[in-house]
Image (cartoon, rainbow, N blue to C red):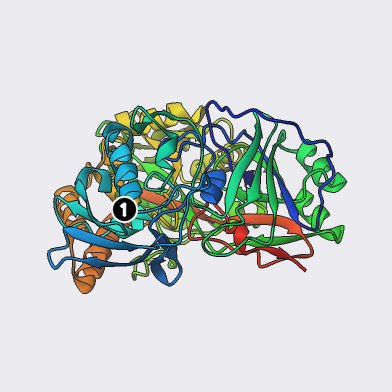
Amino acid sequence: MVLFIVSACSANNTTSEKKDNEVNRDNELVYASAKDINDMNPHLYTGSMPAQGMVYESLVENTKEGIKPLLAESWEVSEDGKVYTFFLRKDVKFHDGEQFNAEAVKKNFEAVQNNAEKHAWIKLSTKIESVKIVDQYTVELILSEAYYPTLLELSMTRPYVFISPKDFKNGGTKDGVSGFNGTGPYKLTEHKTEEYATFKANDNYWNGKPEIKSITSKVLPAGETTLLALQKGEVNFAFTDDRGADSLDVEAMNQLVDSGDYQLVRSEPMNTKMIVANSSKADNPISETAVREAIWYAIDRETISKDILNGTESVADTLFSSNVNYANVELKKRGYDVEKAKEILAENGWQIGSDKMRIKDGKKLAMKLYYDSNSSSQKTQAEFIQGSFKEIGLELEIIGEESTSIANRRSTGDYDLLFNQTWGLAYDPQSTIAAFASEASYLHTTKGIEKADELYNTIEQVMVSTDEEIRKSLYANILTIVHDEAVFIPITNGSMTVIAPKNLDDVSFKQTQFELPFELMNFK
């Protein structure tokens, strides 16, 4: 299934309506979105990330080749890893004409840190002690201890990006902002809530004028309405990630491509869809390593990938795909093998009962799997897996709930199995792995395993390590522990997919499933 990027909550900046529904294909992209762009405050989390990515920029950029300069021309890291000195570009202005400089950096960082509770999910927010202006275009970021993912977390779409200090309210951004002036290649110029938002090229952009002069996000219902809008030319672009409700199926995509008007471009793997197992639930069979391993062998990922997801996602054999930093580790291969699953269960005392379900010490091999009720593909996968588990004598109850309810179960430990996914290419492995020890995320997933203490200690070490070879070794140990314990059972790798006009060149992807480099695109 193809999934359009979505965001949540309220919006403002209502302005004039577009007069013409037809896309000017020479210099304009109009993309379909399931939801409004919402609040574009870059230091909060309700806004559309693709939209924010066009407007705001960070000090550094995460690329396939590693961290590269963006608003900082260069940087230095102190020997103890606690001080990052950034040398800023001198030719950058905010959309309102304000100069980007060290003072603007300090004010933005402090605005984020003054809302610390909101940003607790990002480890860097707990490490920043202060921001010091050295001169007009030099700034120091001072940490409480060495933290190797610092540059990675500074490169994210939010929150460590920059908005004009003139837009601050009450000296900060946590109470809202009065405008949305960033330094990026596009400016937000029109916004009619729940209808559309238009972004115009920033002609004064420090890295050169974008060739695409206008980009509009148009709110459309998923499915047939979106397909018809693409066919009629009311929108001419769509891009997907793996968060949100199913919007276009493969047949619809193929229909657009077959028309000769559109091309389909897919990224390399961005994240891993998985089933998370609660190792700490002592009163449930899922607490046994052998049961989790049998479950892994009992899932036919090939059929899920090809038949249920129509080839839009690839089979995942490990928690992270090999293109994720530090994840190219040699791990035990567990393919689809029903007989192997049965053998493991039998060897560990789970015998077939009179009803063909397995039993051990008077307890039935039974558990619950929670899925997102707004995702038809998750529901179909859950039903398919339910049938597969029956083959090995495991009784599975599947329960659909709202994503917020599932997130709450994950943090409280009130689950046996649930669908989830890794944070994604730009955030991993550090963000997903840090979540292994977080009460808000995967603590209940990991704390029941034999090597839990070793796992948590290794996570602490890898985050402060300044030696690349030691870091590789620590990550290999972490990935081996959770793989051997089968607490994160991978299903498929999700990618970003773009439906674009056939004559649009240089369609590419960033190291994130949340934004696209529109400024690099151009029409033939």
The relative height of residue 90 versus residue 53 in the rendered view (above or below) is below
| Residue at (22, 69) in percent of width and height | 473
Out of 516 and 270, give the one closest to the viewer: 516
Quadrant assignment, res 474 = bottom left
The relative height of residue 117 versus residue 78 in the rendered view (above or below) is above
In the image: residue 292, left or right of residue 139: right
The residue singled out by tag 1 in the image is 102
Q: Secondary structure at mark 1?
A: helix
**Residue 329 in the image: x percent, y percent?**
34, 69
Q: Quadrant of the C terminus?
A: bottom right
Quadrant assignment, res 311 = bottom right
**Residue 452 in the image: x percent, y percent?**
19, 48
| Residue at (26, 35) in percent of width and height | 439
Callout 1 crowding tier (Cα within 10 Å): few <14, some 14–19, many ≥20: many
The relative height of residue 478 versus residue 227 in the rendered view (above or below) is below
The relative height of residue 293 versus residue 226 in the rendered view (above or below) is below
Out of 416 and 223, give the one closest to the viewer: 223
In the image: residue 173, left or right of residue 228: left
| Amino acid type at mark 1 | Ala
In the image: residue 266, left or right of residue 19: left
**Residue 64 in the image: x percent, y percent?**
46, 69
